[in-house]
Amino acid sequence: MRKLAIGIAASGALALTGLVAPVASAATTVPDLTFTDVIVNKGKAIVVGTTATVKVPVSYTLTRASDVTIDNKTAVAGVMIYRGRLATLQNTVEPDSAPVCTTTATTATTVTEACTETLAVAPEDSLFEAADATTWRAAGFYSQIDQDRDDSDGHISFGYDYNVWGPLGSGIQVKRAARLTADASPEPVTKGRTITVTGKLTRADWATGKYSGYTSQKATLQFRAKGSTGYTNVKTVTSGTGGALKTTTKAVKDGSYRYVFAGTATTGSATATGDYVDVR
């Protein structure tokens, strides 16, 4: 949801809410701004659980006309991410604090700056449904207010202008965080006997604020022998009802078993903690 731009507006006589960019109160001139080299989260997917706020770094180059004001009080520019189309925004996340920009070049008419900012993606404030786990886009925005709150003459005014440019850069994947468990039994076990490895694959449900079972997904059972530094693949298992995983293998030597989930287009990867089995 918009935070920075709305925060500026809320300091005036009117607090703007909603996801659709407000229409300017009067005819305005579109400011001359260009956003380039936009990189969100270092090019990686944004994976969000049910409670923790994910801090997402954003970097970009901003070139503006030298007469465009950006004081982070009455005017602010930055980069947001959004789902949908610019004209029909379905969800947005804006920086909740002013970007940090350093001037890298100037001409008689322009100023070029290298800028960084942070998007705070809080599941309870920013993500609301499974549809949010998809490809988002980046856009540059410029927000400005013009207000006269002196009512001594019997008149006040408040004008709000909001401009957005996008999409910028490549698509940004927002994914649901996954969790994975593994439990190998019996412990200890006689060499050559059967070991049963159970587990559960779940993923964040932003609508309920809880983790729910992720069914019909492939997870790989891995084994690391005692004294070894790495795991090796044993077999692939498909999650069932409630995300349940279950398979068997022969006890050969002491070591740890775990499940690994590679992730999907909508859900992040997950690795279970290894469960150690003593083979006698």
Image: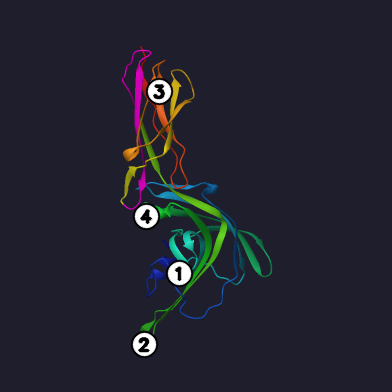
Q: Nearer the viewer, residue 71 or 125?
A: 125
Left or right of 50, for residue 138: right
User: Where 3 falls versus 208 (above or below)?
Assistant: below
- Mark before the other along the chain sequence, 4 or 2: 4
Residue hosting label 1: 21
Q: Which residues are magenta?
A: 183-207
Residue drawn at 51 percent across, 57 percent down? 137
Q: Nearer the viewer, residue 68 or 35?
A: 35
Estimate the x, y position of residue 208 in percent, counting from the top left: 30, 51
Residue drawn at 66 percent across, 70 percent down? 109
Residue hosting label 2: 154
| Occupied quadrant, residue 129 | bottom left
Left or right of 34, for residue 17: left
User: Is residue 58 something one can see in this rendering?
Assistant: no
Query: Is residue 224 magenta-colored?
Result: no
The crowd level at tag 2 (other Cα within 10 Å; few <14, some 14-19, many 20+) is few
**Distance between the Cα atoms at labels 4 and 3?**
37 Å
**Distance between the Cα atoms at labels 2 and 1?**
30 Å
Residue 115, which numbered label? none
Residue 129, which numbered label? 4
Name the kind of residue labelled 4 in the image.
Glu
Residue hosting label 3: 256
- Helix, strand or loop at mark 1: loop
Where the N terminus falls, by quadrant?
A: bottom left
- Helix, strand or loop at mark 3: strand
Q: Are marks 4 and 3 in contact (CB under 8 Å)?
A: no
Q: Are marks 4 and 2 in contact (CB under 8 Å)?
A: no
Farthest-out residue, right: 108
